[in-house]
Image (cartoon, rainbow, N blue to C red):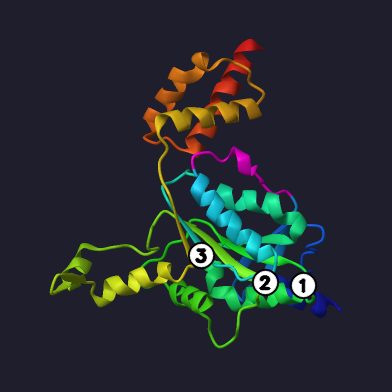
Amino acid sequence: MERQHLLEGLAALLGDSSSHPLPDFAQVKAARWRHLPLGGRLEGVTRVDLPEMDELLGIDETKAALDLNTRQFVAGYPANDALLWGGRGTGKSSLVKALLQRYAEQGLRLIEMDADGILDLPEILAALQAADPEQRYHFALFCDDLSFSSDDPGYKALKSLLDGGVEARPDNVLLYATSNRRHLMPRHFSDNEEYHRHGEEIIAGETAEEKISLSERFGLWLGFYPFDQAMYLDICAIHLRRLEVTADAGEWREEALRWALQRGSRSGRVARQFARHWAGSRALAAQ
């Protein structure tokens, strides 16, 4: 008996999914893939950060595109994998989580995985199939801040998922990834040496084509850009209202602009951080 307990404990530590219960997706809206030495396991997430779609400003076109794709997906129609790329703090991951908020009741479930989890993609798909044998749910694999080095083994694993390997991907699984890099891989100055001219056309070399080809395997390729000053202040106002601050904009406008200048960015993340600072400092001073 003691030996059996020891083996079960070792299996759980190394990642044997059979030793760990699968999430009940009727009870949880999201799960996390935990990468372990011998594979990994799905762990349900009971507290999920779910922003409201209407609170994401300045990205109306990208919101509409990804929302339409997600509606197709949860309705059981063909839909595309999506790469959300652009500046830090511009709402990429918030948009994916807002879609879960909007479509969870229609069967959407979010599976968060990190870069290490990409190597476990066959195990993740098998675990999802076991957790939902009747395929009542639609799973969006969510990889936040995705990027690869030149020799990263996860690169080929992801290409196999996107283009299809020998084993077909389930129809109720797609991938939403975010990245600060447009092509997911670093670009080097030496890549330019491979470009050559064919008449009036510039032809990319093999290295550059390989780096570009991965991002092009995503059916949707959505860019996120820095906000202008007016949009940044509007977002500050929304976050302040969420914190139940009723002050007039004239009271905090200049400080919000200085806050953004000090951080070298006007983004949704910076706006949220300013709002928390301003609301907290004023509440403390009043106390």
Name the kind of residue labelled 1 in the image. Answer: Asp
| Label annotation for residue 115 | 3
Residue at horizontal 70%, vertical 74%?
A: 127
Dot placed on the residue nearer the N-terminal end, 2 or 1: 1
Q: In this view, does 107 lie above or below 281?
A: below
Residue at horizontal 50%, vertical 32%?
A: 271
Q: Is the magenta stretch mostly helix, strand or loop?
A: loop
Binning the other alpha carbons within 10 Å of mark 2 as few (below 14), some (14 to 19) or many (20 upward) gives many
- Residue identifier under label 1: 132
- Asked if residue 56 lies in the magenta stretch, the reply is yes
Please identify the quadrant where the N terminus is shown: bottom right
Q: In this view, does 119 lie above or below 269?
A: below
x%, y% of residue 226? 40, 41
Binning the other alpha carbons within 10 Å of mark 1 as few (below 14), some (14 to 19) or many (20 upward) gives some
Magenta stretch, residue numbers:
47-58
Q: In this view, does 255 lie above or below 162?
A: above
Spot the residue most to the right.
Answer: 1
x%, y% of residue 185? 36, 64
Name the kind of residue labelled 2 in the image. Answer: Asn
Dot 2 falls on a residue whose secondary structure is: loop
- Residue identifier under label 2: 172
